[in-house]
Amino acid sequence: MTNRRVLPLNTSTLEADEIAAAKAVLDSGMLTMGRLCLEFEAAFARFVGAKHAIFVNSGSSANLLALFAMLDPVRGDRAPRGIKPGDEVIVPALTWATTIWPVIQAGAVPVFVDCDPATLQMQPEAIEAAIGPKTRAVIVVHVLGGAVEMPAVRDIAKKHGLWLMEDSCESLGVYWDQKHVGTFGDVGTFSFYFAHHITTIEGGMVVTDDDYFADLLRAQRSHGWIKHMQNPAAFVDPASEIDKRFLFVTTGFNVRPNEINAAIGLKQLPRLESFNLKRREIGWKLDAALAGLIADGKLSVMRFPQKCSPAPFGYPVLARTNAERNALQAHLEADGVETRPVICGNMVRHQAMRHVPYRVSGKLDGSDKVMDCGLYFGAHPMMTDEDIEYVVDNIRRFYK
């Protein structure tokens, strides 16, 4: 029996620079969204290679804004691709709930497709098979630091005239064929929650190359107000006599970030590449250490296609049966190794879906397998070789 340790899914990556930057904001008295938020937006856009980045208070809010901007309430029926109530949006069954709720809140119907349990990602052929006469958009989710085959999905969306949104909240800094995920479609979203690839404590980002769409996002982020738009003239009726300081041109929310979030983000962003390299190294070491169990078919682990440069969000494994997964999970937790289910598993099976309209395309066997047999534990950049050895020893003891 090994000496019991505690290995959390994630630990803080904040260092003295981040703490000093946050304190400097408090000392300045300039706390609400301002100069630092704009600097962080510009730095992030440069990093991922997008024209516009719109900073918000969470990755969930990033998804919400992206969906509601697709409605385009400014142009209404004149919006050539505006999503209307009853329209369908293709989504993965294996995802987090906040990919799905904005679709429903916008009045659209989610259409669920399966994942490949080997990679955990949506498959282009499943997306194309799900397209129907009411389909208006596809939301791709890059799961747990991997990536969907985006060039193929982009071609499908273009062929059918669909919006393409990438939820990259779990895959910041991941590349497909040397291009950042989140930048293939019309709009991409990212999260800076405390346990994610970098953190602003809470925070998220929406990116796009479309000038009009970016300004619509800026307005909807802040009540529908024109204040933060770069080109408000494109939205304002020239005959309007309303004071431009308090002019509203669209529906909106209040999902603004603050200067403390941005100050931390500006210090964290330059560290992202080194964090993700460490995540990859941890994944490689775990792959090598568990190779015997994998070869014997006792465990399956997440695989990444050759063109994907990953950044493992955690280390997911699939056991052979639900009972074996439950026993492995209990064994690891008893020895202090924190685990989680693989996000929501099959979202269709959750109670909340009983109360909303949706459609399923094909079978969801892969998502069921992940839900019933999967779990993941930490692969964060603060893990040590001793931590990795402790996890591996516990898994080997279980299978003995």
Image: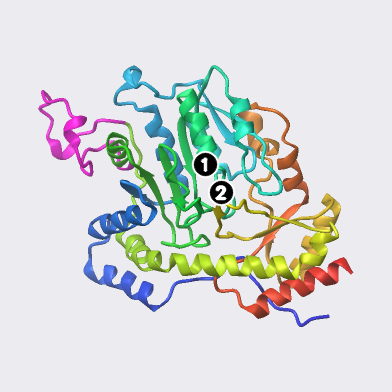
* Quadrant occupied by the C terminus: bottom right
Disc 1 marks which residue? 150
Q: Please, is residue 366 above or below residue 81 in the view?
A: below
Callout 1 environment at 10 Å: few (<14), some (14 to 19), or many (20+)?
many
Q: Is residue 10 visible?
A: no
Residues shaded magenta: 221-250
Q: Please, is residue 253 above or below residue 16 in the view?
A: above
Percent x, y for residue 354? 66, 30
Q: Please, is residue 307 above or below residue 294 in the view?
A: above
Disc 2 marks which residue? 147
- Residue at 70% in and 37% down: 349
Between 103 and 136, the one nearer to me in the picture: 136
On screen, residue 194 versus residue 208, left or right, reads: right
Percent x, y for residue 305? 62, 51
State yes or no: discs 1 and 2 in contact (Cβ < 8 Å).
Answer: yes
Between 301 and 1, the one nearer to me in the picture: 301
In the image, which disc is placed on residue 27?
A: none
